[in-house]
């Protein structure tokens, strides 16, 4: 996957990632559960990606990019106070 395709993918799914992060944080607000929350996103996305046209390769190729985006989103929300610790 080239840089432009990757960039387009991330920006196209970023609103969904933000919604997912906020929804999961609301459902599981306990601190220290980041790995479990990320695993939930992974499981949801794996299922939906496997049912898609897989336009960007395998899910294992896409997941590191999405995972990093999720982690960056959570870090930004934590540092700006959107998520209260």
Image (cartoon, rainbow, N blue to C red):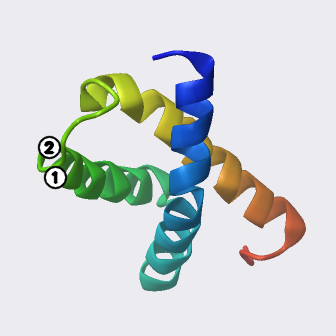
> Left of 40 or right of it: where is 46?
left
Looking at the rendered image, the quarter that the C terminus falls into is bottom right
> Left of 50 or right of it: where is 35?
right
**x then y, percent, for residue 71:** 61, 46
- State the residue at coordinates (16%, 52%): 47
Q: Spatial distance from mark 1 to mark 2, Cα to Cα?
A: 5 Å
Hey, which quadrant is residue 44 in on the image? Answer: bottom left
User: What residue did someone put label 2 on?
Assistant: 50
> What label does residue 47 carry, if any?
1
**x then y, percent, for residue 50:** 14, 43
Label 1 sits on a secondary structure element that is: helix
**x then y, percent, for residue 7:** 62, 34
Label 2 sits on a secondary structure element that is: helix
Are the residues at dot 1 and dot 2 in contact (C-beta closer than 8 Å)?
Answer: yes
Can the viewer see residue 14 in this picture? yes
Q: Is residue 31 above or below residue 13?
A: below
Numbered marks: total: 2
> Left of 36 or right of it: where is 50?
left
Can the viewer see residue 29 in this picture? no
> What label does residue 58 carry, if any?
none
| Mark 1 crowdedness (10 Å alpha carbons): few <14, some 14-19, many ≥20 | few
- State the residue at coordinates (20%, 55%): 48
As drawn, which residue projects farthest toward the bottom?
A: 26
As drawn, which residue projects farthest toward the top?
A: 2
As drawn, which residue projects farthest toward the left?
A: 51
> Left of 71 or right of it: where is 21?
left
| Mark 2 crowdedness (10 Å alpha carbons): few <14, some 14-19, many ≥20 | few
Looking at the rendered image, the quarter that the N terminus falls into is top left
């Amino acid at each position: 996957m080239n840089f432009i395709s990757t960039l387009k993918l991330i920006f196209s799914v970023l609103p969904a990632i933000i919604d997912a992060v906020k929804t999961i944080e609301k459902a599981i607000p306990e601190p220290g559960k980041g790995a479990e929350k990320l695993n939930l996103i992974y499981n949801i996305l794996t299922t939906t990606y496997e049912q898609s046209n897989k336009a960007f390769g395998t899910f294992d190729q896409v997941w590191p990019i999405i995972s990093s985006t999720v982690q960056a989103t959570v870090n930004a929300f934590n540092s700006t106070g959107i998520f209260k610790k």
